[in-house]
Image (cartoon, grey):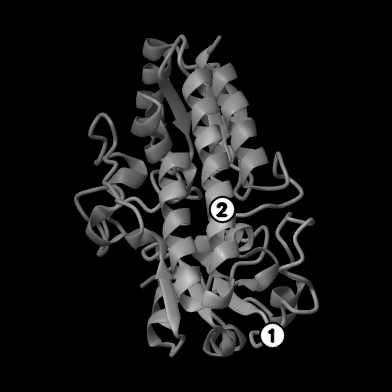
Amino acid sequence: MNVRRRPISAAAVAAVTALGLGTLSACSSDSAAAGNTDKFDVVASFYPMAFLAEQIGGEHVNVISLTEPGQEPHDLEISAKQTAQLQESDAALYLKGLQPSVDEAIGQSGIGTKIDAAGLTSLEEHADEHGHEGEGEHAHEDEHAHEDEHAHEDEHGHEHEGGKDPHVWLDPVKYAEVAEGVGKAFEKADPDHAADYRKNTEALVEKLNGLDAKFETGLKDKKTDVFITTHAAFGYLAERYGLTEEAINGLDPESEPSGARVKELAETAEADGVTTVFYETLVSDETAKTLATDAGLKTDVLDPIEGITDESRGDDYFQVMESNLKALQTALGAK
């Protein structure tokens, strides 16, 4: 497996705090370094999982994120320190298929409660809308190539079993389904606080339903349904709201597309009235700007919310999702 090895230092892990949720006391710089506290200790694989754990757990949980803010989750390689934290924690919350090193570490750990978010909702395949499997990233003709763009294992070790797309958190409805499953798992694992977990889960699901309604209304009347991104992360969002995602690079946001793929996307943009090429905050915008310049298009951010940084357009999942909605409305000509 060709995975970038970028171990996270113990100091970096200790620095992970509430990931933008400053109002919560569940995670602090003091407690984040230890996996054995008097609270319900949860190790989360990356931001969308940590956010669920903190929202649902509230004051009863101590949450440690294995992926530090600003790091591409796919780059993560578990350190010995993090492996020890897993062993000391009460629960692990992860999304199988997104981070192979996390999957392996949790699978080999003796942790009592293992919560796989991928098993709490239905995962689907999101093949390119126009069958682009032979261009640029979609070709990816190496030993890891598979017949579906979401099935391959790219340089980040981004391997999705059976070609399933793991980016369920970008669909508020599916994210709510995951939240409900996480809430039930917390109730079972820590029954003393079950009532609070249930109440917090209901509040979170209600808020996610409200976000879904905002997207539904906000994207109802638009000039075009097509949007172009560097990273094929928005298949669930596109499917939920009747959009068509055209990705430059498939699943690897840092790979270089072929000249043929760039030309093809420029033609698609002209034919479908596309105005904007979207890029994300955690990777270079060079490819997006190159395509945009060649095709006479604008660029903007569409954030897959794999981590919250100072560059993020918002302090938490909901704020960034609403920023994504505004960006889509502008790009698609929504009224």
Please identify, in this view, whether the residue under mark 1 or under mark 2 is nearer the observer. 1
Position of the N terminus, as image quadrant, is bottom left
Judge left or right: residue 270 versus residue 69. Answer: left
Judge left or right: residue 226 versus residue 309. Answer: left
Position of the C terminus, as image quadrant, is top right
- Pinpoint residue 265: horizontal percent, then vertical percent: 39, 25
| Residue at horizontal 37 percent and vertical 19 percent from the top | 268
- Pinpoint residue 216: horizontal percent, then vertical percent: 47, 24
As drawn, 73 above or below 302: below
Q: Label 2 neighbourhood size at 10 Å, few (<14), some (14-19), many (20+)?
A: many
Instruction: Name the residue type under label 2.
Output: Glu
- Pinpoint residue 61: horizontal percent, then vertical percent: 64, 72
As drawn, 31 above or below 87: above
Element on which disc 1 rests:
loop
- Pinpoint residue 100: horizontal percent, then vertical percent: 40, 71
Q: CA distance from mark 1 to mark 2?
A: 29 Å
Q: Are marks 1 and 2 in contact (CB under 8 Å)?
A: no
As drawn, 218 above or below 125: above
Judge left or right: residue 291 versus residue 47. Answer: left
Q: Which mark is residue 306?
A: 2
Using the rendered image of the protein, determine whether residue 49 is visible from the camera's viewpoint: no
In the rendered image, which residue does mark 1 sit on? 38
| Residue at horizontal 74 percent and vertical 77 percent from the top | 14
In terms of image quadrants, where is residue 211? top right
Instruction: Name the residue type under label 1.
Output: Asp
Using the rendered image of the protein, determine whether residue 32 is visible from the camera's viewpoint: yes
Going from N to C along the chain, the mark reached first, 1 or 2, is: 1
Q: Label 1 neighbourhood size at 10 Å, few (<14), some (14-19), many (20+)?
A: few
| Residue at horizontal 57 percent and vertical 84 percent from the top | 89
Q: Which mark is residue 28?
A: none
Judge left or right: residue 72 versus residue 142. Answer: right
Question: In this view of the protein, which residue sits in the foreground, 250 or 19?
Answer: 19
